[in-house]
Amino acid sequence: MLEFWVDPECTYHKAIFAEDKRFLFFCAGGLRSALAAQTAAVMGLKPVAHIAGGFGVWKRAGGPVELPQTDKSKLR
């Protein structure tokens, strides 16, 4: 879906990809995020980066991790 979200001509385009931001892609092992960052850069999205080695490497290295807030009403 990334190609559709980044492409401003696509009906599935996500407005956040048109903003002046730095985009960091990550996945568990670093391979999918490397491909995603490369694809986004080729499509003109800049600047982009990814976490080499993935989220696991980031976490083991002591990188900061923020857990999402849970809506306890959805757990019932």
Image: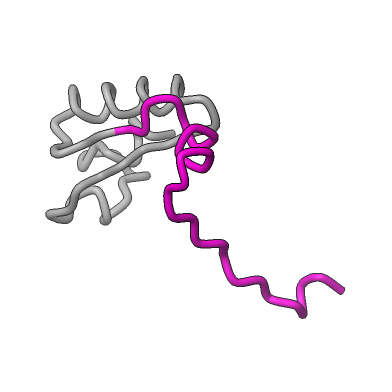
Count numbered badges in the picture. Answer: 0
| Residue 70 position in % (x across, y down) | 66, 71
**Magenta stretch contains residue 58:** yes
Q: Nearer the viewer, residue 6 or 21?
A: 21
Q: Which residues are magenta?
A: 50-76
Residue occupying image coordinates x 36% and y 33%: 51
Toward the right, the furthest residue is 76
Q: Nearer the viewer, residue 58 or 51?
A: 58
**Magenta stretch contains residue 21:** no
| Residue 23 position in % (x across, y down) | 26, 44
Q: Nearer the viewer, residue 55 or 42?
A: 55
Residue occupying image coordinates x 54% and y 32%: 28
How is this picture coloured? one colour
> Quarter of the image holding residue 76?
bottom right
| Residue 4 position in % (x across, y down) | 35, 35
Relative to 54, residue 38 above or below: above
